[in-house]
Amino acid sequence: MKTLKKFCQENGIDFDRAFDLVLGEGGGILPQKIGMQGYFAEITDKSLICTNEVLNVKREILFASFQTAEFGIGNGLLWLQCTVERRPFVFCSARKNWKSPAAKLLLKKIGEHVKIQGMKEYDGYTGSKFLFYMFK
């Protein structure tokens, strides 16, 4: 299984502009097999370019097309639940990914178009008191 780092090296992508996401609901924006589907995403100034080499998919999602965004916790994971072009677009990632420079850039770019709700969930999940936050 390919790592995000290897994907970046092979495609000439700055690691600080790459995000590893697991799609929970693609709403037709990104295809998925039954269940959740993994994607590597490049964060540009105007879009999120999502790639899944197994499915042979590469799709660009413009940040300007985001209509809502809200963090929530489910199954011990941090999910970003979005509406893009009036369709659900929901994804999660590992805690270390949410703490990365790429995640901060992703949130900045989405935040330029919509107010991201639930930042308290993001701060608790990525903060130094993570275990206390998850078990309170």
Image (tube, rainbow, N blue to C red):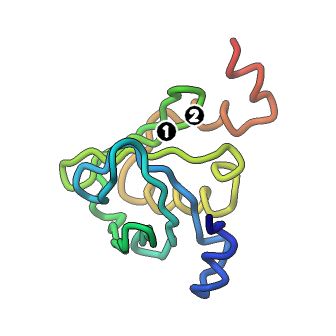
Q: Quadrant of residue 122?
A: top right
The one of 88 and 66 positioned closer to us in this rendering = 88
Crowding near pointer 1: few (<14 within 10 Å), some, many (20+)?
many
Left or right: residue 70 compared with residue 8 = left
User: Can residue 53 be seen by looking at this rendering?
Assistant: yes
Q: Element under label 2?
A: strand
Residue type, mark 2 in image = Leu
Does dot 1 land on a helix, a strand or a loop?
strand
Label 1–label 2 contact, CB within 8 A:
yes
Percent from the top left, x then y, of residue 71?
Answer: 48, 36
Measured along the vertical axis of the image, is residue 46 above or below residue 34? below
In the displayed structure image, the side of residue 42 where residue 89 appears, left or right: left
Q: Nearer the viewer, residue 67 or 58?
A: 58
The spot of residue 46 in percent (x, y) is 40, 74
In the rendering, at what x and y percent does residue 40 appear? 52, 66
Question: Which residue position holds label 2?
Answer: 77
Q: Quadrant of the C terminus?
A: top right
Give the farthest residue toward the left: 86
Q: Residue tagged by mark 1?
A: 79
Question: Most extreme residue toward the top, as rendered?
Answer: 136
